[in-house]
Amino acid sequence: MSHASETLREIIDHKTVEVAAAKQRTSFSELEAMVAQAEPPRNFFAAVTKHPAPDHTSVIAEIKRRSPSAGLIRPEYEGDAFRPEDIAGKYAAAGAAAISCLTDERFFGGHLSFIERVKAACPLPVLRKDFLIDPWQLWESRAAGADAVLLIAECLNQGTLLDMLILAQQLQLTVLLEVHDVENLLRVRPHIGFPHAGYGLLGINNRDLSSMKVDLNHTLRLVDMVEERSILVSESGIKTPQDLRRLREVGVRIVLVGEHLMRQDDPAGALRALLAPASS
């Protein structure tokens, strides 16, 4: 088992304990009542799949404070100085199509409350990025104001995945179903957009879980296995307008960009530079 797979295993083990504790704190009927009162979700799927121009790429800009591999991404993200709502407002002004917000506390320094803070500060739909392993967390996500959720194929067996896809659609949540390798792509491919096409996106993560190396060519290699490219999202390792152009050339017009933006002095300025026309 590689180091990265061990990290994933450790995260899942911790998440299992965390979810059990959360279920003790909030009863399902309380959660249901919260969902019943929540605002209807913003349409994440529509926000990222509509393109105003032929050379347009939708960027899902990510708010990420730390990662297991990199630690704290910038020293000033320590403590209360980290204000996800400020970053979100600036991302929106810089041309982001949607926001991805890390809510895992232990490994990524996120918090579930970040979602409402981000939504209050900007009009874009927000993806809850976390390790969702239990349908209960979909209710929790919806109650917390998420418009979309990440499901990682590597973390879910087939039965749980299908249950969660059905429930996400009932809760009106867009799903970004993420795969890291060919095996998982082939396994989940028949279920993309299940049970209803307007709710499902397929993410190809360019980070190799066995080596942690990031390679944009990973998306370019796997793209031929996907018939409906309009729902494809390339994640990780995207840094330049040329990267966006290479992806558009194979029909991939949605990207998720996190660490590259969050590392810069000015994440929104970095997003503007990414979205600038590519010089040949």
Image: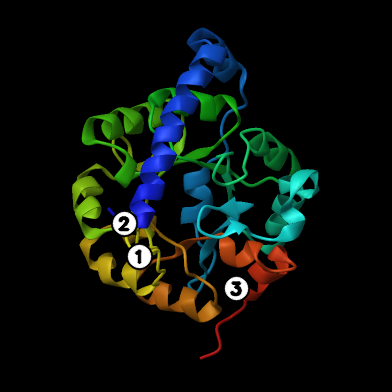
Q: For mark 2, does the 10 Å Cα neighbourhood hold few (<14), some (14 to 19), or many (20 or more) residues?
A: few
Residue type (three-letter) at the residue carrying disc 2: Ser
Mark 2, secondary structure of its residue = loop
The residue pinned by badge 1 equals 211
Residue 274 is labelled as 3
Q: Residue furthest bottom?
A: 280
Q: For mark 1, does the 10 Å Cα neighbourhood hold few (<14), some (14 to 19), or many (20 or more) residues?
A: few
What's the distance in space between the residues labelled 1 and 2, CA to CA?
7 Å
In percent of width and height, residue 9 lies at 36, 42
Badge 1 vs badge 3, beta-carbon distance below 8 Å: no
What's the distance in space between the residues labelled 1 and 3, CA to CA?
26 Å
Q: Which residue lies furthest to the right in this view?
A: 81
Frontmost of labels 2 and 3 is: 2
The answer to whether residue 162 is above or below residue 100 is above
What's the distance in space between the residues labelled 2 and 3, CA to CA?
32 Å
Residue type (three-letter) at the residue carrying disc 3: Leu
Mark 1, secondary structure of its residue = loop
- Nearer the N terminus, badge 2 or badge 3? 2
Badge 2 vs badge 3, beta-carbon distance below 8 Å: no
The residue pinned by badge 2 equals 2
In percent of width and height, residue 164 lies at 35, 30
In percent of width and height, residue 105 lies at 59, 39
Mark 3, secondary structure of its residue = helix
